[in-house]
């Protein structure tokens, strides 16, 4: 049963740490839900609601029914731009390696993620292609390529990832069978595989996976240093992981035990 902080009061170290982490999740993901946060932090929903109320008073987020959302679009765009610049060299190497899995004439699924955008930059010699994606930034980057047919999956726009989410995306994917999905990840867990902190994003990623015969995960090694509280896909569902050479040895062994091909670049 969830328990509240053993230390009470507005200056509780546990409370301050939790609120800081909640604020970071909202900035990264765009929205959070009370029940998910309560389960993740091991406290009651009442405690989480109090946290969200305090963070709203501080101007960090806006409460809504059942959770909270990030401040207007400008804040989400700033967070997105910050993520784009993180570990850029590793992302570029991963993107270049991922492009080698694409053959002229392929139909591919591209997830929303900054590393996937780096992959698009290396597809010039892989055309003609048909690309299905839920990522606005991927669509924008594809405009530089010739002989590419782009299918954009419609849905609710999530500005923190520049992707579309929701039932419309999932419904469209239910009618598709694509050879390869290039999947992005917020976080990867050595025991549970791909994880996330937003249920809508997790559901969309699962729908992408169901529409593909082969799943190729693009995730730099920093993604293994965090853990979401929602399971997305186990390693057993993934054919290949492309990451950088800073990947911890324990995580490399776990994937190899699951039969996953790992490319270190």
Image: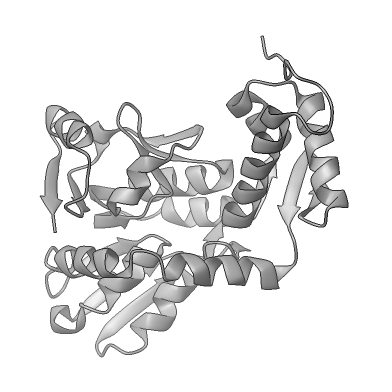
Residue at 26% x, 69% y: name it. Answer: 89
Which residue is at 51% across, 32% downward?
229
Q: Position of residue 140 (x, y in %)?
A: 43, 82
Quarter of the image with the C terminus in it: bottom left
Tell me residue 219's x, y (percent): 30, 53
Q: Can you give x and y, in whole percent of width and height, for residue 134 in the image?
A: 46, 64
**Residue 131 visible from this viewpoint:** no
Outermost residue on the top side: it is: 1
- Asked if residue 180 shows in the view, the reply is yes
Q: Quadrant of residue 51?
A: top right
Q: Pick whichever, 190 or 213, lies toward us.
A: 190
Name the residue nearer the viewer: 165 or 119. 119
Q: In the picture, residue 44 is in which quadrant?
A: top right
Residue 52 lies, in percent from the top left, at 79, 41
In the image, is residue 107 above or below residue 104? Answer: above
Quarter of the image with the N terminus is top right
Q: Is residue 96 above or below residue 3?
A: below
Q: On the picture, is 181 further left or further right than 27?
A: left
Label count reads 0
The foreground one among 222 and 240 is 222
Left or right side of 172 for 240: left
The quarter of the displayed image where residue 92 is located: bottom left
Which residue is at 34% across, 64% downward? 87
């Amino acid at each position: 049963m969830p328990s509240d902080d053993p230390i009470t009061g507005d200056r509780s170290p546990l409370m301050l740490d939790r609120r800081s982490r909640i604020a970071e999740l909202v900035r990264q993901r765009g929205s959070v839900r009370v029940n998910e946060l309560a389960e993740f932090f091991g406290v009651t929903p009442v405690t989480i609601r109090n946290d969200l109320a305090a963070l709203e008073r501080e101007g960090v987020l806006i409460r809504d029914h059942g959770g909270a959302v990030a401040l207007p679009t400008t804040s989400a765009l700033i967070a997105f731009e910050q993520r784009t610049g993180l570990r850029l060299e590793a992302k570029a190497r991963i993107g270049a390696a991922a492009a080698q899995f694409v053959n002229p004439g392929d139909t591919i699924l591209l997830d929303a993620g900054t590393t996937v955008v780096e992959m698009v930059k290396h597809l010039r010699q892989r055309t003609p292609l048909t690309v299905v994606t839920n990522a606005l930034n991927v669509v924008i980057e594809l405009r530089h390529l010739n002989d590419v047919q782009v299918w954009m999956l419609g849905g609710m726009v999530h500005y923190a990832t520049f992707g579309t989410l929701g039932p419309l995306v999932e419904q469209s994917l239910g009618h598709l069978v694509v050879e390869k999905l290039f999947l992005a990840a917020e976080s990867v867990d050595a025991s549970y595989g791909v994880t996330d902190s937003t249920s809508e994003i997790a559901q969309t990623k699962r729908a992408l996976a169901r529409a593909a015969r082969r799943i190729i995960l693009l995730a730099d090694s920093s993604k293994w240093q965090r853990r979401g509280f929602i399971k997305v896909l186990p390693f057993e569902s993934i054919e290949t992981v492309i990451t950088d050479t800073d990947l911890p040895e324990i995580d490399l062994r776990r994937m190899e035990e699951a039969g996953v091909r790992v490319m270190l670049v």
